[in-house]
């Protein structure tokens, strides 16, 4: 069994009578990229802060590297907080060296690593510039380097893609993947499902402070009914014809003379059997489109099945 790096067991945290995290349990195994997903305000940041000992749970237990979070364990962690904060008047390389020194890296080694990472991040030209002269994306990269420069075993990133343009988001995805390939364990929170779908070995879904899913991306997508969109120009009633294959609905829209339908396939049903049934019945199809589910669809489906509401709709 892979080593458990982080474990939260039945953890609850309340602020001024409002429950931010409600009886949440999960674990992060060594070598995994784990996505901690949910809309803003779902309880992700509170959970991460309890993971690091920044906040103490009202109930439940947190273990980091097998014991209560403490200074020794935190030296093995790289944490990028949601609230960005690096010293704007300091030179870029000095900021990176400063954070490395806080984690016990010798000054010369810290500068050597910092310059190497700036080169890898295409920021070597900015090493001697004050942070305040950088663009938002460049400053974000400097903070990420400061998070990684001490070569942590466990990397926690809280909404790392927030505020980045699409080009820098892609760049950060490559950074996360490279860290995983180097053997690091990564946990990142986000409300943007597409990043997690591309990167993660495992996902945790949380809504309104409650965990609603814990498993692989494939398992999450398997929770969503497979859907087929159909358009016909014949008078056939597809509800009657295809009832054995799943839940059929007549949809609004379509051009004059065109009927629109959607079919949520039953677990044992196959799209090819649906197509054959239509052909055998003489249905005149102008569209037959099986649709691949995405993680956003899975999230919405799982939240609704849990009887909860999404206070702020998760991004696609």
Image (cartoon, rainbow, N blue to C red):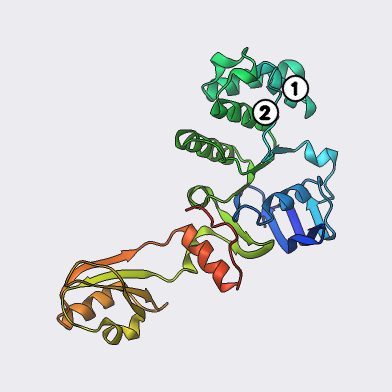
Instruction: In this rendered view, identify the residue nearer to me: 120 or 20.
Output: 20
Q: Compared to 104, does 127 lie above or below?
A: above
Please, what secondary structure does the residue beneath circle 1 have?
Answer: helix
State the SS at label 2: helix
Give the quadrant of the N terminus.
bottom right
Decide: few, some or many residues near mark 2? Use Cα within 10 Å; few <14, some 14-19, many ≥20: many
In the image, what residue occupies the spot 70% across and 57% down?
27
The disc at residue 190 is: none
* Residue positioned 79% across, 39% down in the render: 74
27, 125: nearer the viewer: 125
Label 1 Cα neighbours within 10 Å, binned few <14 / some 14-19 / many ≥20 = some
Q: From the top left corner, tell me how far across and down residue 61 is, in percent.
A: 82, 58
Residue 311: quarter of image: bottom right
Residue position marked by numbered label 2 in the rendering: 146
Q: Position of residue 6 (x, y in %)?
A: 73, 51
Q: Which residue is mark 1?
A: 98
Q: Is residue 232 above or below residue 10?
A: below
């Amino acid at each position: 069994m892979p080593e458990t790096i982080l474990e939260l067991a039945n953890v609850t945290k309340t602020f001024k009578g409002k429950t931010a995290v409600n009886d949440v349990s999960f674990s992060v195994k060594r070598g995994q990229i784990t996505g901690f997903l949910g809309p803003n305000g779902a309880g992700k940041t509170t959970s991460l802060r309890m993971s690091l000992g920044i906040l103490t749970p009202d109930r439940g237990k947190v273990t980091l590297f097998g014991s209560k979070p403490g200074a020794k364990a935190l030296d093995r962690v790289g944490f990028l907080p949601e609230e960005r904060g690096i010293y704007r008047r300091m030179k870029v390389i000095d900021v990176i060296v400063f954070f490395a020194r806080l984690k016990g890296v010798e000054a010369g080694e810290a500068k050597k690593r910092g310059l190497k990472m700036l080169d890898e991040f295409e920021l070597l030209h900015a090493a001697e510039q004050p942070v305040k002269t950088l663009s938002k994306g460049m400053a974000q990269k400097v903070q990420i380097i400061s998070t990684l420069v001490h070569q942590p075993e466990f990397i926690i990133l809280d909404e790392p893609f927030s505020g980045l343009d699409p080009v820098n988001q892609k760049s950060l995805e490559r950074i996360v993947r490279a860290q995983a390939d180097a053997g690091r364990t990564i946990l990142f929170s986000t409300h943007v499902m597409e990043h997690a779908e591309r990167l993660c070995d495992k996902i945790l879904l949380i809504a309104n402070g409650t965990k609603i899913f814990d498993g692989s991306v494939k398992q999450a997508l398997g929770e969503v009914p497979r859907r087929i969109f159909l358009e016909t120009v014949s008078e056939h009633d597809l509800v009657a014809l295809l009832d054995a294959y799943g839940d059929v609905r007549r949809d609004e829209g379509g051009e004059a003379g065109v009927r629109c339908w959607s079919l949520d396939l039953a677990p044992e049903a196959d799209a090819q059997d649906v197509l054959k049934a239509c052909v055998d019945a003489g249905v005149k199809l102008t569209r037959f489109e099986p649709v691949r589910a995405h993680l956003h669809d899975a999230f919405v489906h799982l939240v609704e099945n849990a009887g909860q509401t999404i206070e702020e709709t998760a991004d696609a």
